Every structure is written in C-alpha cells, then in structure tokens.
Amino acid sequence: AQSVTQPDIHITVSEGASLELRCNYSYGATPYLFWYVQSPGQGLQLLLKYFSGDTLVQGIKGFEAEFKRSQSSFNLRKPSVHWSDAAEYFCAAGSARQLTFGSGTQLTVLP
Amino acid sequence: IAGITQAPTSQILAAGRRMTLRCTQDMRHNAMYWYRQDLGLGLRLIHYSNTAGTTGKGEVPDGYSVSRANTDDFPLTLASAVPSQTSVYFCASSDGTSGREEQFFGPGTRLTVL
C-alpha cells in the first residue's frame, strides 16, 4: 500500500535557525513528490515538487527539498527560518489520480 | 480571480441530516477532488472527478457522494451525517490528471456533526 510518513508531529525552531522536515514514502515505483504548506485557517499551498532529474529541488519562500531514492526520502529544508514560516507542512506522494498525504508537521517559530 | 470557493465556511449539523458542501472553481480545471482533514491523519481523498460527467472513489468514500454536472462545480453530499464525519473538508482542482499537476485548494469547510 502507498504511504507517506512524516515522523515529526511538531518541530520548534528559533527565527533565523535552519530547518529540516522529514518525509519518507513507500510506493511501488518512484512517485511524484510534493511539499505543501497550510497556514492557520487556510487551504494548502504548493511549495515545491519533484518528478525526475536533479534531486535537489528549489521551491517558493526559500524552501528546497532533496530526493534520496536509496532512503525513500524527500526532506524539506530552509537555511534560515522566518516567523512567517510557522504553519503546518505536508509531504505528499502521487501518481495519476491518487495523491497520498503524510500526517503533517506543525512548525513553531520562536522569536 | 477567486480560484476555488467553498461554502459554507463552517456548519454544525445534527446526526442523520443531509448536507451538501459546495465547491466551485473558476480556473477551468479538468480534475477536482474532495479531501477530509483530521488531526494526525493528514488529508485523505474522498472522491475525485477527472472531467465533467465522471467521478471516482478515493480512500474514504463511504457515506459521501459527489456529482460533476459541469466543469466548475463539484458538490459533496452527506446523505445522513454521522459524528465520525466531523472534519474539515477541502476541495481541490488540478489542470490535468497525470499526477504531476499542482492541486489548488479551497479554504475548507469545517463540519461538526452532533
């Protein structure tokens, strides 16, 4: 069965610190991979996506993610977190017709 | 450009009542989706539609039905609501069905079934 695991339910970082959010997937073949962000009371917004090619993907708001096939991982990173990055982050893996989401990681940013 | 609108924003419903959640997109996207979001479970697909006139079942379709009479609208109906259907419901759309396309999400409907 297809699954996406985000091991960290909640992460707290200080503003200006670096950030890494973990994501592991289980799929029959390499799926399409996405990171979405959800601000409080809002819908989800796409940060970045990976289909093939360069395993380091750049997204919006200064985020990047690295695909590692050997580890079935697609971790999200940001070198310096801003207070406005506080939100919930969802990793998703998909193929035609089906997008499977992880359970999300809630990010708190301390001043 | 509104993108995706959902109505109502929130609703409290008595168990056993019928409820339709509305979703409208103005991007002329072929595909539309309904998800429910529950704490600790992320988003789970309820139903989807790849094009007007067709629908399909997602991961958690029981107790829900959808229709897609035209490109823009994709209502979700709970025929007889139960408390386990208390959730936040998100409608989404995408311009294509290959799986590579970004899904655009509405603001959500918070539904409480008592």
Image (cartoon, grey):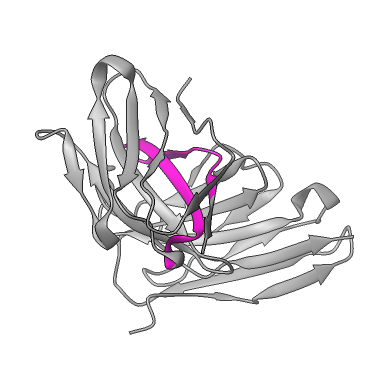
Q: Which residue does the image show at 81% across and 56% down from the upper left? A: B80
Residue B57 can be seen in this image: yes
What secondary structure predominates along the stretch shown in magenta? strand
Q: Is residue B77 magenta?
A: no
Q: Judge left or right: residue A46 versus residue B86.
A: left
Taking the magenta stretch, the answer to whether it contains residue A96 is yes
Start-end of magenta stretch: A84-106
Identify the residue shown where x is 43% and y is 59%: A15
Compared with B101, B74 (above or below) is: below
- Above or below residue B89? Residue A13 is above
Residue pictured at 53% horizontal, 44% vertical: A105
Of the pair B103 and A109, the residue shown nearer to us: A109
The image position of residue A47, as x and y in percent, is 31, 55
The x, y position of residue A44, in whole percent, is: 45, 60
Q: In the image, residue B35 lies at what x, y percent?
A: 55, 52
Q: Position of residue B56 (x, y in %)?
A: 47, 44
Residue A51 horizontal side relative to residue B10, left or right:
left
Q: Which residue is more in the foreground, B50 or B33?
A: B33
The one of B69 and A72 positioned closer to us in this rendering: A72
Residue B108 versus residue A68 in the image, above or below? below
